[in-house]
């Protein structure tokens, strides 16, 4: 449904449905809805609720029940993009498709695109740990489940030599010692934290 059609039916509903009159008279929200690029992929009212929350508007069950009488969802398949290599611009655009508050989507976009470890993430567990360690930013499990619908991971191979702390921390002590041997570094008696520090410094 295009913007003009959407506006026409909302004008009709304002007159016909008292329960929707105030909601659909909120011009900023309706304009944001019409301009929302992710609307093609919506499969429920969750995305509208998140969008409304951004505009300090609450959508109740009564609203949704009434809207169900006039609208149905026929979403296009949501493309799955590689979170490791997607550009910052594409990342921002894709995140705004999800049922997240606008501020939350923008915050995630900034954190993801600026993370130096992003090329090496293997899964959401890696992502969550990296962002927590790098910036003390916590991604709730519920948000990770939402993002899993539109992102996948294809990590870049480790650099040679591997001086990347995020990757070194994932290795066992035995593997770290082997890496130190390859570089001719003395590691006798060193614990994991010391080995990571030694190898990450080159």
Image (spheres, grey):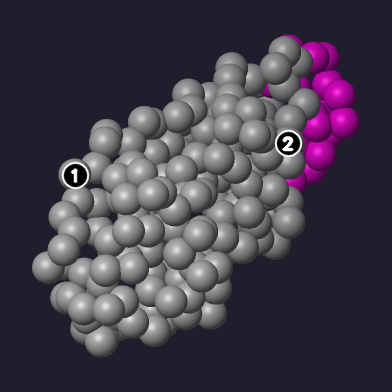
Image quadrant occupied by the N terminus: top left
For residue 28, above or below residue 125: below
Q: Residues within 10 Å of mark 1 (few under 14, many from 20)?
A: few
Residue 134 image point, x, y percent: 73, 51
Q: Nearer the viewer, residue 119 or 109?
A: 109
How many marks are shown on the rendered structure? 2
Is residue 140 visible in the rendered structure shown here?
Answer: no
**Is 36 above or below relative to 22?**
above
* Between 195 and 166, the one nearer to me in the picture: 166
Image quarter hosting the C terminus = top right
Region of the chain picked out in magenta, as a range: 179-202
Nearer the observer, 150 or 2: 2
Residue at the image position 18 percent from the left and 59 percent from the top: 71
| Secondary structure at numbered mark 1 | loop
At 63% from the left and 54% from the top, the residue drawn is 106
Q: Which of the numbered marks, if any, corresponds to residue 116?
A: 2
Q: Is residue 98 left or right of residue 196?
A: left
Q: Residue extending furthest left? A: 69
**Which residue in the protein does label 1 denote?**
74
Residue 10, above or below 199: below
Residue 56 percent location from the top left of the image: 53, 79
């Amino acid at each position: 449904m295009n913007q003009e059609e959407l506006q026409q039916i909302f004008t009709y509903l304002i007159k016909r449905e008292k329960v929707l009159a105030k909601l659909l008279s909120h011009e900023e929200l309706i304009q944001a809805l019409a301009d929302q690029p992710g609307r093609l992929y919506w499969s429920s009212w969750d995305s509208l609720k998140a969008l409304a929350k951004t505009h300090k508007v609450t959508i109740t069950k009564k609203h949704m029940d009434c809207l169900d009488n006039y609208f149905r969802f026929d979403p296009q398949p949501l493309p799955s993009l590689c979170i490791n290599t997607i550009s910052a611009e594409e990342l921002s655009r894709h995140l705004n498709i999800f049922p997240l508050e606008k501020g939350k989507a923008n915050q995630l976009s900034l954190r993801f695109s600026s993370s130096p470890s992003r090329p090496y993430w293997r899964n959401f567990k890696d992502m969550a740990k990296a962002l927590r360690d790098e910036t003390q930013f916590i991604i709730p499990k519920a948000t990770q489940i939402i993002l899993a619908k539109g992102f996948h991971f294809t990590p870049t191979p480790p650099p040679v030599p591997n001086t990347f702390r995020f990757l070194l921390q994932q290795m066992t002590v035995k593997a770290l010692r082997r890496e130190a041997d390859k570089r001719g570094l003395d590691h006798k008696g060193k614990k994991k934290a010391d080995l990571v520090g030694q190898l990450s410094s080159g």
